[in-house]
Image (tube, rainbow, N blue to C red):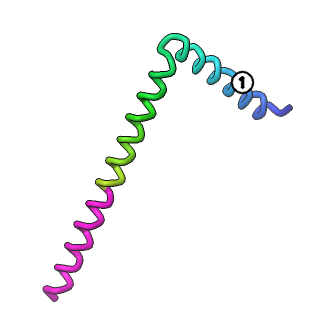
Amino acid sequence: MSVRDAGRLGGLKGGRKGGLAVKAERGVEFFQEIGRLGGRRVRDLIAAGLKATERQRKSHKLSLRRD
């Protein structure tokens, strides 16, 4: 096993141990709630990006008409 593989394995074990500790302390509901919050945030960011793109397209179309 290479040093890189050993480090990766150690990180996986540590992450699992930490996740299990949080699960024991806060419960499954905590992970469900942060998942929902993350999903909402992503949805809001996508909507904001689409809105900005649409504004940019409209602005570009208006500038083409002026020429």
Question: Where is mark 1, residue-wise?
Answer: 10
**Residue 33 screen position, x and y as percent:** 41, 28
Residue that appears at 55% across and 12% down: 24
Name, please, the residue furthest toward the top: 25
Q: Residue furthest bottom?
A: 67
21 or 7: which is nearer to us?
21
1 shown above or below 60: above
Please name whichever residue, 63 or 58, is drawn nearer the observer in this view of the structure. 58
Was residue 53 drawn as part of the magenta stretch in this picture? yes
Query: Which residue is found at the position 45% from the left and 33% from the top?
Result: 35
Residue 26 in the magenta stretch? The answer is no
Point out the image quarter for the N terminus: top right
Quadrant (top left/top right/bottom left/bottom right) for the C terminus: bottom left
User: In the displayed image of the protein, which residue is found farthest to the left?
Assistant: 66
Q: Main secondary structure of the magenta part?
A: helix
- Asked if residue 23 lies left or right of residue 66, the reply is right
* Residue at disc 1, secondary structure: helix
Q: Residue at x 62, y 24 (%)?
A: 15
Q: Residue furthest right?
A: 1
Question: Is residue 8 depicted above or below 53 in this figure?
Answer: above
Rendered residue at 23%/76% (across/down): 60
Range drawn in magenta: 49-67
- Nearer the observer, 24 or 45: 24
Residue 18, given in percent of the width and then of the height, sits at 59, 18
Say what amino acid the circle numbered 1 marks. Gly
Badge 1: residue crowd in 10 Å (few <14, some 14–19, many ≥20) = few
**Residue 36 horizontal/vertical position (percent):** 41, 35
Vertical relation: 40 (above or below) 23: below
Quarter-wise, where is residue 42 in the image? top left
Image quarter of residue 23: top right
